[in-house]
């Protein structure tokens, strides 16, 4: 019995070391993220063919905690999404739809309203900004914007890992959209390489597993609803 326990313990120990090595390798996290981020090509901007009716930018995060400048309060994913939406707005002139409700550290501060202030400070007219002021997750955000998305051609901006889920939600709700991925966590290069263990790679691996789990959950919900 003790020999079996020792054998099982050794197997567990070696497996743990191998898992740690894999999940802390940037190349391994790139492999996990590649199907999520690089199967979606960035659309060609052909404004002569068809202009968007709206630009929808999904919420990420804004920190209400601490004494820091306004720019430092925006997370990297929010900053990239907002800047991309601003760039697309300047090219197309389409109004920007901002989703996201009261999910921040300070529950009295609304994400959509803060995002609206961001765009106004960067020169976007108030008349070109629509805020839903609702949504604590991706599905709720899409639901909050449906009155605008139905029967419209929408350009959708979000992190690259979210595009599969967004496409599913648009299909479920019979909405038409083009998807503009930003905030990539991998470069899409699959040439193998080894480095020292990286905490950042571990975080990226975690993000990939989270998104795969979210996709599985979404597809199961779709399956059981139909």
Image (cartoon, rainbow, N blue to C red):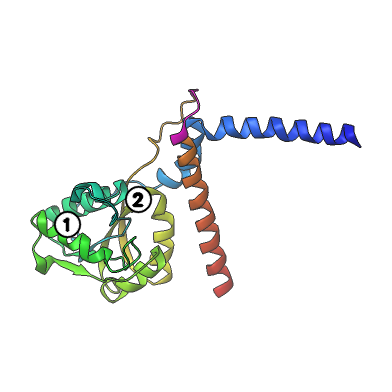
Between residue 82 and residue 110, name the one nearer to us. 110
Q: Is residue 48 above or below residue 108?
A: above
**Residue 173 lies in magenta, yes or no?**
no
Q: Position of residue 72 (x, y in %)?
A: 23, 46
Q: Position of residue 79 (x, y in %)?
A: 25, 49
Q: Is residue 21 above or below residue 34?
A: above
Magenta region's main secondary structure? loop
| SS for callout 2 | strand
Mark-to-mark CA distance, 1 and 2: 19 Å
Dot placed on the residue nearer the N-terminal end, 1 or 2: 1
Q: Which residue is mark 2?
A: 159
Between residue 225 and residue 175, name the one nearer to us. 225
Q: Residue at x 57, y 68 (%)?
A: 223
Say few, some or many: other residues with alpha carbon within 10 Å of mark 2 (under 14 / 14 to 19 / 20 or more): many
| SS for callout 1 | helix
Can residue 16 be seen?
yes
């Amino acid at each position: 019995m003790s020999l079996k326990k020792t054998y099982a313990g050794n197997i567990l120990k070696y497996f743990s070391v191998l898992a740690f090595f894999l999940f802390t390798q940037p190349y391994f996290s790139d492999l996990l993220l590649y199907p999520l981020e690089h199967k979606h090509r960035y659309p060609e901007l052909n404004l002569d063919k068809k202009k968007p009716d709206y630009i929808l930018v999904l919420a990420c995060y804004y920190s209400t905690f601490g004494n820091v400048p306004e720019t430092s309060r925006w997370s990297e994913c929010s900053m990239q999404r907002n800047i991309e939406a601003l760039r697309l707005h300047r090219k197309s002139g389409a109004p920007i739809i901002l989703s996201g409700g009261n999910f921040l550290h300070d529950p009295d501060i609304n994400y959509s309203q803060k995002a609206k202030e961001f765009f106004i400070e960067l020169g976007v007219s108030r008349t070109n900004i629509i805020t839903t002021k609702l949504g604590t997750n991706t599905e709720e955000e899409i639901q909050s914007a449906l009155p605008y998305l139905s029967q419209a051609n929408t350009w959708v901006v979000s992190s690259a890992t979210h595009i599969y889920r967004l496409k599913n939600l648009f299909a479920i709700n019979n909405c038409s959209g083009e998807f503009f991925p930003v905030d990539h966590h991998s470069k899409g290069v699959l040439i193998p390489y080894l480095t020292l263990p990286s905490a950042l790679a571990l975080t990226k691996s975690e993000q990939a597993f989270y998104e795969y789990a979210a996709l599985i959950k979404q597809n199961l919900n779709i399956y059981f609803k139909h």
